[in-house]
Image (tube, helix red, strand yellow):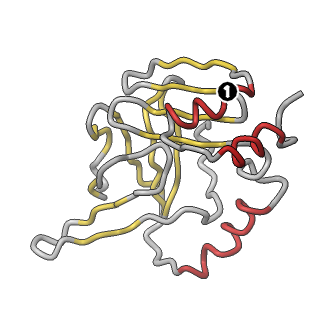
Amino acid sequence: MADTGALRPATHALLRVTTPDDDRVWICDVGFGFGPLEPYELVDSAGEFALGEWRYRLERRADQWVMFQFGRDGWIDRYTFTENPQFRIDYAVGNHFVSTSPRSPFTTRPFLQRFLPEVHYVLDDLTLITEYPDGTGTSRDLDPTELTKILGETFDIDLTETDAATLATTPWRRG
C-alpha cells in the first residue's frame, strides 16, 4: 500500500482513550491486521516509535492522522484517521460493502492476517506472506490442498471436515 495521502472510507474503528490522571490521549486499535499490538499515544511529536520490535510512524496532516508501519517495502501507509467522533451507524455502509460486495477483497478470496510480537502472517488467496519486524519476509504460493493445514498451524483455525471440504471446492481459486 503506497502512501497516497487519500482519505479512505470509514470501515475500521479505533478507540480514543483519555487517561483521567494526566489527560494524555491514547489510540487503541485491537482489530487492525497489521497491528499495533498495544496502545500508542496520540501526540503531534510522536514521529517514529516502536511497539515491541515493530516500528511505526505517526504523522499529522491537517485534520487527519496517518499511521505508517515499517515493513519489507519500507514505510507503508497503513491507515488514516481523524479525531471526529464516530458512531456505529457511521460504519454501516462501509462494513456492508467490505462484507458483501463482489468488488471487496474480503469476499472474493481467502484473506487472513495474524499479527504476533515476532511475526506477521498474511494469507491472500493462495499466497502465504510472512513478515518480520526488521523488514524481512518471505512469500510462497500454496497448493490448495495445503490450506486446511496452514489455517490450523499458522492461523490457529481448525476447520471441521465439512468446512474443509467447502473450502476445497470454492470457486474463488485462481486459475
Q: As displayed, is residue 127 above or below residue 2? A: above
Q: How far across and down, in percent of the image, does residue 57 sit?
A: 38, 41
Q: Quadrant of residue 54?
A: top left
Q: Is residue 61 left or right of residue 95?
A: left
Q: Extreme left residue here?
A: 21
Q: Is residue 160 left or right of residue 13?
A: right
Q: Is residue 159 left or right of residue 13?
A: right
Foreground: 94 or 127? 127
Foreground: 172 or 24? 172
Q: Determine crowd level at label 1: few under 14, some 14-19, many 20+ residues with C-alpha closer than 10 A.
A: some
Q: As displayed, is residue 80 above or below residue 109? A: below
Foreground: 131 or 83? 131
Q: Is residue 90 left or right of residue 110?
A: left
| Callout 1 amino acid | Thr
Q: How far across and down, in percent of the image, does residue 15 sit?
A: 38, 67
Per the image, the residue denoted by label 1 is 127
Residue at the spot 29% in from the left edge and 31% down from the top edge: 53
Residue at the spot 52% in from the left edge and 81% down from the top edge: 87
Q: Extreme front residue here?
A: 161
Q: As displayed, is residue 79 above or below residue 18? A: above
What secondary structure is found at the residue carrying circle 1? strand
Quarter of the image for the C terminus: give it: top right
Residue at the spot 67% in from the left edge and 27% down from the top edge: 127
Foreground: 164 or 131? 164
Quarter of the image for the N terminus: give it: top right
Q: How far across and down, in percent of the image, does residue 122 sit?
A: 57, 34
Q: How far across and down, in percent of the image, does residue 39 sit?
A: 29, 55
Q: Quadrant of residue 88?
A: bottom right
Residue at the spot 48% in from the left edge and 32% down from the top edge: 75
Count the marks.
1
